[in-house]
Image (tube, rainbow, N blue to C red):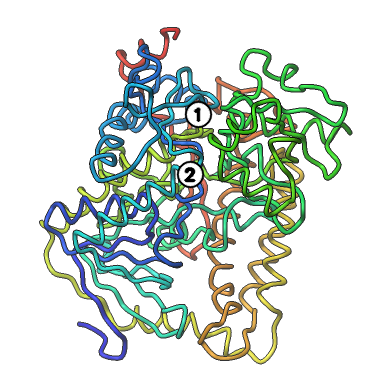
Amino acid sequence: MANEKYETHEHDVLIIGAGGAGLRASIEALNQGASVGVVCKSLLGKAHTVMAEGGVAAAMANVDAADGWKPHFRDTMRGGKFMNNWRMAQLHAQEAPDRVLELEKWGALFDRTPDGKILQRAFGGHTYKRLAHVGDRTGLEMIRTLQDRGVQQGVDVYMECTVTKLLKDGDRVVGAFAYWRETGRFVVFKAKAVVICTGGIGKAWRVTSNSWEYTGDGQSLAFEAGAELKDMEFVQFHPTGMVWPPGVQGILVTEAVRGEGGILRNKQGERFMEKYDPKRMELSTRDVVARSIYTEVREGRGSEHGGAYLDISHKPADYVKKKLPSMYHQFKELADVDITTGPMEVGPTCHYVMGGINVDAETGAATVKGLYAAGEAAAGLHGGNRLGGNSLSDLLVFGRRAGMAAAQYANGVGGSSVGNDQIEAAAREMLEPFERTSGESPYDVHRDLQESMQNLVGIFRNQEDMTKGLDNIEQFKERAKKVRVDGSRMFNPGWHLAHDLKNMLIVSEAVALSARERKESRGAHARVDFEKLDDAMWGKQHNIITRNADGGLNLAQRPLMEMPEELKQVLAEDQ
């Protein structure tokens, strides 16, 4: 029965998150005739998809005729160091071109080849020129197109609304409890299926390209509802974030700068990528470039503010402004640097998580009934390291599949009821920080967590650091239980953070536990105490995080799914 006390909305499919995956899922669920609600923590149009600058990876073969789904599949698997869910990598490579053409049909404007096809550019880890793009603001165009389409088709959007708990009827998910950020009023969503598209976890680190929304909400909601998390140790540090001035630390410098010919140098002026990957140089995979910059800095050859110099000023100024308009303005306005005449100072920044909610390849179904996930919140496609451009096609391919599956499930499922006690418990949990008469500010705990994750579970890892990091997390959990918040529920960022902190602690612990367990270096997970890839033991399995009876985290290993012979053949072929 509905709780009369709280505002209540009902939908067949509730989608949490309004980035590319959430919007694409909503469009597909609407196509299936479902009533759809989209809840987003921020404003519509402010999703992280907007920050994706380089392009959307799809083997359309418009520039390199030799491209096709097989080379794209091969690049994705090799980039992910074979930790990928091979079926997801296959579906992604096969379906991405159609998804891009569909976007174009819905009004997306791409850069063109002279004969009018969608132009594609080179990118790290991709064998062929494969990234369809709109200058260096592809994600923005994608969100604009998907938003227009979704709104026009009649999706209900609930903006500036944060979900704090998934509601269950027995073993299935049947809704969500949330609050309006502006007023602090509680709201209940009833739904037959829920799709999580909340993005990543970057705000658990000090230097990150992620904005304030990225606190691991979806991963934690799913985990608390009984779903599995997978491969959380694989956190990608993008090699090039701005390092100076301090106010812009972590803001992304698109890989397209390197795709268009940008060169990385250390303070001695050496093009150091020659040492680390002589074949691919600046267009090596992100994990390699990030660790190369980090190594240069650690060995005393870093730039003035602890990064490296990225230089595209050897290209004509007009070319740079045409190909990289956003980068030109970003550096001019934020750092007072003209990238057509001098270098940018860049360094690694926590960017993306390859791990996430464990989902089925075909449907995006999580391991709990009625729950689905897509985009960065879901694990599988990218394995141990994501290739640039694959995230945008991931959103389209698996957003569509999750939306379709959720709507079909909702169609066939009976009514449900949510006990009032569940709703009241969720409300009580949110109000506790106001009721404490003593306790520290959530900002202090968050700052200490970020510092600990940055230093102990960062770009290079070892046993001792991670054990210390996990000890710290235990202390932070105790501190977080006692944080105190002043004022009212209206416009109260401290209160919002008190809740977000709980999510960041869950995902931080999942990352640190999985990372300590993986005793090898693979993809974005680099151990100084285990520098080699260990095929005998560790390459063969996933780290799975589940919830134990008292709500804590359990860690288990699960073997990789056996790949069919014909795909093994595809992998064995050389380009």
Q: Nearer the viewer, residue 317 or 235?
A: 317
Where residue 192 appears, as percent x and y from the top left, is 20, 64
Q: Is residue 202 visible?
A: yes
Please tell me the numbered disc located at residue 323. Answer: none
Q: Nearer the viewer, residue 395 or 139?
A: 139
* Residue type beneath disc 1: Gly
Q: For the point 52% across and 47% down, which residue is it?
A: 555
Name above or below for residue 217 compared with residue 488.
Answer: above
For the residue carrying disc 1, how many other residues have a C-alpha within 10 Å: few (<14), some (14-19), or many (20+)? Answer: many
Mark 2 element type: loop
Quadrant location of the N terminus?
A: bottom left
Q: Which mark is residue 137?
A: 2
Query: Residue 295 vs residue 388: left or right?
Result: right
Taking depth in this image into account, of 118 and 529 the one nearest to the observer is: 118
Residue lying farthest to the top in this orientation: 574
- The residue carrying mark 1 is 80
Is residue 118 found left or right of 230 in the rendered image? left
Q: Is residue 163 above or below residue 196?
A: below
Three-letter amino acid code at the position of disc 2 = Arg
Label 2 to label 1: alpha-carbon separation? 25 Å
Which residue appears at 43% of the width and 71% of the height?
162
| Image quadrant where residue 166 sits | bottom left
309 w.r.t. 229: above or below: above
Image spot of residue 374 (x, y percent):
36, 48
